[in-house]
Amino acid sequence: MIELGRSESLKLLAGVPFGRVGFTRQALPVIRPVNHLVDGDAIVIRTHPGSALARNTSVDEVAVYEADDLDPRTRTGWSVMVTGRASLVTAPWEAARYRALLVPWTERGVDEIVRIRADLVTGYRLTR
């Protein structure tokens, strides 16, 4: 297992379409699969209004985002985790920009935009 630097980790994360967001709901951990966008030092995801994620990020909740690309046959690949404060994007122009760039995988009304600041980025490459 080889530790990756911040920039390589974010570049790998930007190269895959989905991952998992982890946050706290009623003092318990919750993990949800979502698609994402890497924008500089932030991970951007969409969620539906009233979701647990949208409610919890209204107060700068600490969240984690993880994505990977693993090959079970060769036992190689990589995994990246970003930890930071998550907040709702409320500026109309900024939210509209993200809605245009990040197409949701579901047909549900996922109009809320959540941005996770990449305060801590860890990445590992699995090699033979």
Image (cartoon, grey):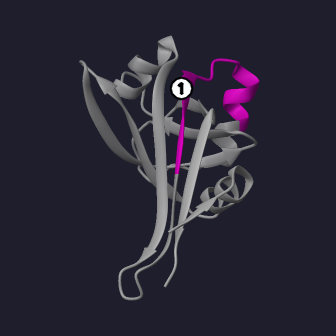
Percent across and percent down for residue 17 are 55, 60
Percent across and percent down for residue 88 are 56, 22
The residue shown at (44%, 36%) is: 109
In the depicted view, which residue is nearer to us: 36 or 118? 118
Q: Is residue 90 magenta?
A: yes
Is any atom of residue 102 visible in this view?
Answer: no
Q: Judge whether 55 appears above or below 16 on screen.
A: above
Q: Is label 1 in a helix, a strand or a loop?
A: strand
Is any atom of residue 104 visible in this view?
Answer: yes
Q: Judge whether 6 appears above or below 112 on screen.
A: below
**What residue sits right under mark 1 in the picture?**
86
The residue shown at (54%, 62%) is: 124
Q: Is residue 29 left or right of residue 122?
A: left
Q: Amino acid at mark 1?
A: Ala
Q: Judge whether 46 appears above or below 127 on screen.
A: above
Q: Is residue 8 left or right of residue 20?
A: right
- Which quadrant would residue 5 be assigned to in this image? bottom right
Percent across and percent down for residue 128 are 49, 85
Q: Judge whether 13 appears above or below 47 on screen.
A: below
Q: Is residue 11 left or right of residue 24?
A: right
Q: Quick one: which residue is furthest to the bottom in this view? A: 73
In the depicted view, which residue is nearer to us: 53 or 101? 53
Q: Is residue 93 magenta?
A: yes
Range of magenta residues = 81-97
Number of numbered discs on residues: 1
Percent across and percent down for residue 68 are 48, 63
The residue shown at (56%, 56%) is: 123
In the depicted view, which residue is nearer to us: 32 or 110? 32
Mark 1: few/some/many CA within 10 Å (<14, 14-19, 20+): many
